[in-house]
Amino acid sequence: MQPRAFVSLMNRAMQNTFAYRTSYIITLLTYFISILSLYALWTAIFDGRDQVAGMSWNQMKSYLLITFMTNSLLSWYSETRIATKILDGSVAVDLLKPLDFQKARLAETLGSCAVEGGLGLLFIAVISAFASDIITPHSPFAWLLFALGLAGSLAVKFGIVYLAGLLCFWSTGSHGIIWSRIAITNLLSGGLIPLAFFPDWLAQWASVLPFQGIVHTPATLFLDQVGTSEAIKLIAVQWGWAIALWWAGKGLWQWAVRKITIHGG
Amino acid sequence: MSFIEASQLTKVFRQAVKDPGLKGAVKHLFTQKYVDKSAVAGINLRIEEGETVAYVGPNGAGKSTTIKMLTGILAPSSGTIRVGGLDPYKRRMENTKRIGTVFGQRTQLWWDIPIVESFSLLKDIYAIPDDVYKRNLDEFRELLGLDEFLHLSARKLSLGQRMRADLAAALLHDPSVVFLDEPTIGLDLAVKQRIREFIKKINRERRTTLLLTTHDLGDIEDLCDRLIIIDHGTLIYDGTLASVKDRFARERTIHFQLNTPVHVASAWTDAFPDIAFSQASPLEWNVRFDRFQVTAAEIVTHALKSADIIDFRMDEPDIEHVIKQVYEGRLDLKEA
């Protein structure tokens, strides 16, 4: 695909996101309310203790903020766009364009993310101004690692969303698939509870699956919980998954296209 | 070689057979039964560059399936297709650059951003040179009257406006062939007329090959030199519209209104043995005849001589009538 077409698609997705701004702000508020309830829950758990599972209360607060941030990178609308395209049949229109389907969806996702992530950041800045004792990376280098981890988080999330979206070729509804994906992602990424709180067997599963790259990795980097070499390893694993998911998506798309072009959907 | 060539084109779909009711649905979970249904069964087509072809047939005849195969988004079960020398399925990406498509029921415009933004995105997707894009856009704006809604999002357009915008979108990259699937469905007469004029002009000036499916016979009469009728996946007619009319729409009926009753039925059949004469009432004659055997002038002259005629009108079967008969199985074009 021409870089120009890619940038152009990103640009249109950004415009589109602005058209959906009200809906996105409401989504953001929903995330915020769920984070607030988690905050209340953790306040009760940390009551009278300095540390739980090796995390201090201040670290926990930062952790919640990062969870909120990774959630706000991609809205519900962007997540369901791929599934919707497949279910309403407008994927036929995409097949009639000289565009690689996966790259085109990536361009759109990046475009929406630029606007949605920006709004999310603004929101976080406002909260941080009111919250106290939030732990932040201690050096510019740590910030850089965090930025890489956040970008990786988006790449992994895109890979998973894309694969889940393509599964709609084999089902007649998207809600089941989307809800299961959200439930699995939330749990195994550390979006609900930090992985440190997991029982050993589950923590081990989580560490070999791609989901941890979405919340656990950027949060660990943000909290400076690991040394530089360990941090680089985390990022490498995360990006390794992002690339593997990309190729898996490519393969699944080719299979799906064969199915619709041969069996007619 | 023709620009579009299809030989022995066949598409077979596998359909699940379920027994009726809940029991059947549960049974299907364990034992799947399928039947093969041919949507297109051995069609041969040759379309030259610059031709305008109407592809018609009743619902479920296989029109859309054929179009999907010609555009490369459906693989034929057997047979071959070449569009400008390329296999549209195997080389889908390359093929998409040279074709334009308009599906009346579906839009390629972005729903929530201004139409002009959808257009400039297409410019980048197809890598349309600046001057070509500008020339095309200016021309389409004028011919289709796009200026009044170019700044609106597709969501806000009326159906007629959306179709005009979709038509422009399909032609911005100067495709050499355009597939139009029911381009005038649900539109009012004025918009239909405007769209037809536009399509005619594009075909005339750019030699763009057009293949359109439609249920609107006005589209066919206005736009197409050639008519292809399919039913049950097979081709039942391929020829000019005029020759369908000559062969199947030969019968005319003249209705005469009389001032005073005259009973001369036998005089009619003596003068013209091949006509069918009837009287709806003592004051009304109906004369049905083949326009290749008797002229309307002869009939009228005879009527004026035999009675005091105050008024008459002539019914001519239109192409709609003929095609309706074909659809209903009352007219077999192959045998005639």
Image: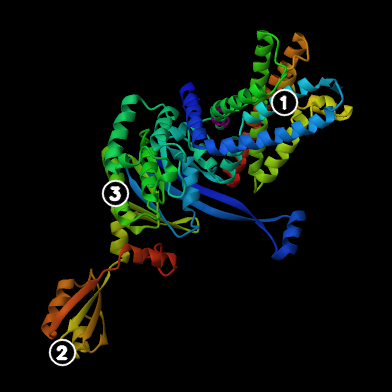
Task: Describe the element under mark 2 as helix, strand or loop.
Answer: loop
Residue B62 placed where, x, y %?
Answer: 49, 54
**Circle 3 chain:** B
Are the residues tagged 3 and 1 within 8 Å (C-beta)? no
The quarter of the rendered structure image containing the C terminus of chain B is: bottom left
**Circle 1 chain:** A
Q: How many numbered marks are there?
A: 3
Between B213 and B310, the residue placed more toward the observer is B310
Q: Amino acid at mark 3?
A: Arg
Q: Amino acid at mark 1?
A: Val
Left or right relative to B195: residue A148? right
Task: Describe the element under mark 3 as helix, strand or loop.
Answer: helix
| Residue hosting label 1 | A215
Q: Main secondary structure of the magenta part?
A: helix
Q: Judge the density around disc 2: few (<14), some (14-19), many (≥20) Cα neighbours within 10 Å.
A: few
Q: Residue at x 88, y 29 (%)?
A: A199
Q: Nearer the viewer, mark 3 or mark 2?
A: 3
Are the residues tagged 3 and 2 within 8 Å (C-beta)? no
Task: Describe the element under mark 1 as helix, strand or loop.
Answer: loop
What distance separates the C-alpha of mark 3 from that of mark 2? 48 Å
Residue A59: mark in rendering: none
What distance separates the C-alpha of mark 3 from that of mark 1? 56 Å
What distance separates the C-alpha of mark 2 from that of mark 1? 96 Å
| Residue hosting label 2 | B260
Q: Residue at x 25, y 80 (%)?
A: B286
**Circle 2 chain:** B
The residue range painted magenta reads: A102-108
